[in-house]
Image: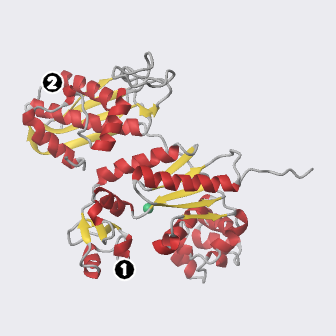
């Protein structure tokens, strides 16, 4: 058989990990914090550090450290409570950016993901340029920095991005990328402590340490049976293969969900129907935005009310595909109007079912420009062949940029008197009122 020169790069796996994510978002939203030690986390006696800036790390502050300990080590640290909704919002934008770059994206939490570039013909240099481009995009579009590991194998890519993170920012410079080619994997992995290997928890690491196995290289000295005996067959085989460069785990696209639901339980029962309507509107909007962000359409929408005796009253639509705040909001409010009047309500739920990826057909209302004669009423020329612009997509973008209240259908706006409750819901969803 003749040897064929293959121009395709074996470096098809990227691991992209945002730096000090929660703390970085706090600095992003409050630029006066730049350069200062920032710790994010709760404030009770049991609170721990959820995230901390590099400036705080210099004082020995680490994630998962008790907050009291962190503030003792670094009394001048700026302490902020976590704003999960804001982090989720940026996490979704991060994911969208990655999905535009690769066929298969496996998110891990909000701030990191594996990318599989697939079998496209790319040279090593092109892959590296793509990784650099992603970092630049994360910086310019999200205002955040990321570490990127590039390798032929998933676990190596992860360990590469982690190695980048270990470097102090001054040493790391602007690159923030580590490429580990297949021929360098053995040298790269060998000295790493086993506890650092993805999939090896503290218990496994302790079991291996008990028989004198501390580093990846140590695993190469023992037969498979020893690892199986210590760890069980699956885990033993995995580490056996990993140590010998034979572990090739696939990047898996996030598993599609069948439904999403948002529930609010009131601190005390609510009687005012208009206020409930306002709550349904806010929940539906959040759901619709989530569908749009994740590129999903739903087959049905449900609205449920729970009465003080814990009886549930539901209405479900099963019409066309819905997605986006506009259409989910409209359907949810129509369903709410068909629910019986209850003397008091304990909890409200809005959910969507039958989720599937949004296809080419745009089902939500469209804006007049982009599908007509090539110009908007305002006279701004747009491409003739541009596809119709979805109203939901525009509304979702505006909200991402200007906050959850930036644009809402008038019909979904709570009455003046309901603002308090809607605000409470916004608070309990973790969304910030602006
Ligand atoms: Mg991170």
Does ligand 1 reach within 8 Å of label 1's beta carbon?
A: no
Location of residue 150 in the rendering, given as x and y in whole percent from the top left corner:
61, 59
Q: Is residue 413 left or right of residue 169?
A: left
- Outermost top residue: 373
Location of residue 108 in the rendering, given as x and y in whole percent from the top left corner:
47, 55
Q: What element does badge 2 sit on? A: loop
**Residue located at (70% from left, 69% from top):** 184
Location of residue 125 in the rendering, given as x and y in whole percent from the top left corner:
67, 56
Q: What element does badge 1 sit on? A: loop
Disc 2 residue crowd, few under 14, some 14–19, many 20+, Cα 10 Å: few
- The picture quadrant for ligand 1 comes to bottom left
Determine if residue 62 is in view. no
The residue wearing badge 2 is 340
Where residue 329 sits, quadrant-wise, is: top left
Between disc 2 and disc 1, the foreground one is 1
Q: Which numbered tag is attached to residue 381?
A: none
The residue wearing badge 1 is 60
> How many discs mark residues in the rendered view?
2
Q: Of 58 and 386, which appears nearest the observer?
A: 386
**Marks 2 and 1, the one that precedes in the sequence:** 1
Q: CA distance from mark 2 to mark 1?
A: 58 Å
């Amino acid at each position: 058989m003749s040897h064929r020169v293959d121009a395709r790069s074996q470096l098809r796996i990227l691991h992209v990990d945002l730096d000090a994510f929660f703390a970085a978002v706090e600095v992003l939203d409050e630029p006066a914090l730049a350069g200062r030690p920032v710790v994010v986390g709760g404030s009770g006696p049991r609170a721990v550090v959820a995230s901390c800036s590099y400036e705080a790390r210099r004082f020995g502050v680490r994630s998962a450290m008790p907050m009291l300990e962190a503030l003792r080590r670094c009394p001048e640290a700026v302490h902020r409570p976590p704003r999960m909704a804001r982090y989720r919002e940026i996490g979704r934008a991060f994911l969208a950016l990655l999905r535009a770059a690769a066929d298969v994206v496996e998110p891990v939490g909000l701030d990191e993901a594996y990318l599989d570039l697939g079998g496209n013909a790319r040279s090593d240099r092109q892959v590296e340029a793509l990784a650099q481009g992603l970092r630049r995009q994360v910086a310019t579009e999200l205002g955040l920095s990321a570490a990127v590991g590039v390798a032929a194998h998933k676990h190596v890519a992860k360990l590469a991005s982690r190695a980048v993170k270990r470097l102090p920012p001054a040493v790391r410079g602007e690159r923030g990328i580590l490429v580990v080619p297949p021929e360098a994997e053995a040298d790269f992995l060998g000295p790493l402590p086993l506890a650092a290997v993805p999939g090896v928890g503290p218990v496994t690491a302790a079991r291996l340490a008990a028989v004198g196995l501390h580093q990846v290289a140590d695993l190469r000295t023992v037969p498979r049976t020893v690892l199986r005996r210590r760890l069980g067959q699956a885990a033993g085989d995995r580490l056996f293969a990993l140590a010998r460069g034979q572990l090739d785990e696939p990047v898996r696209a996030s598993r599609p969900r069948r439904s999403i639901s948002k529930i609010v339980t009131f601190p005390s029962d609510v009687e005012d129907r208009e206020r409930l309507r306002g709550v349904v509107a806010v929940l539906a909007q959040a759901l619709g935005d989530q569908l749009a962000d994740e590129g999903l359409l739903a087959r049905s929408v449900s609205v449920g009310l729970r009465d003080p005796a814990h009886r549930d009253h539901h209405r479900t639509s099963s019409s066309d595909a819905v997605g986006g705040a506009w259409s989910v909001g409209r359907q949810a409010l129509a369903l709410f109007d068909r629910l019986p009047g209850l003397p008091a309500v304990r909890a409200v739920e809005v959910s969507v079912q039958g989720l599937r990826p949004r296809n080419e057909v745009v089902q939500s209302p469209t804006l007049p420009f982009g599908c007509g004669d090539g110009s908007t009423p305002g006279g701004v020329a747009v491409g003739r062949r541009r596809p119709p612009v979805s109203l939901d997509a525009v509304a979702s973008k505006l909200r991402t940029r200007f906050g959850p209240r930036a644009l809402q259908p008038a019909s979904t706006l709570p009455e003046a008197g309901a603002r308090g409750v809607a605000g409470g819901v916004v608070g309990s969803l973790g969304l910030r009122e602006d």
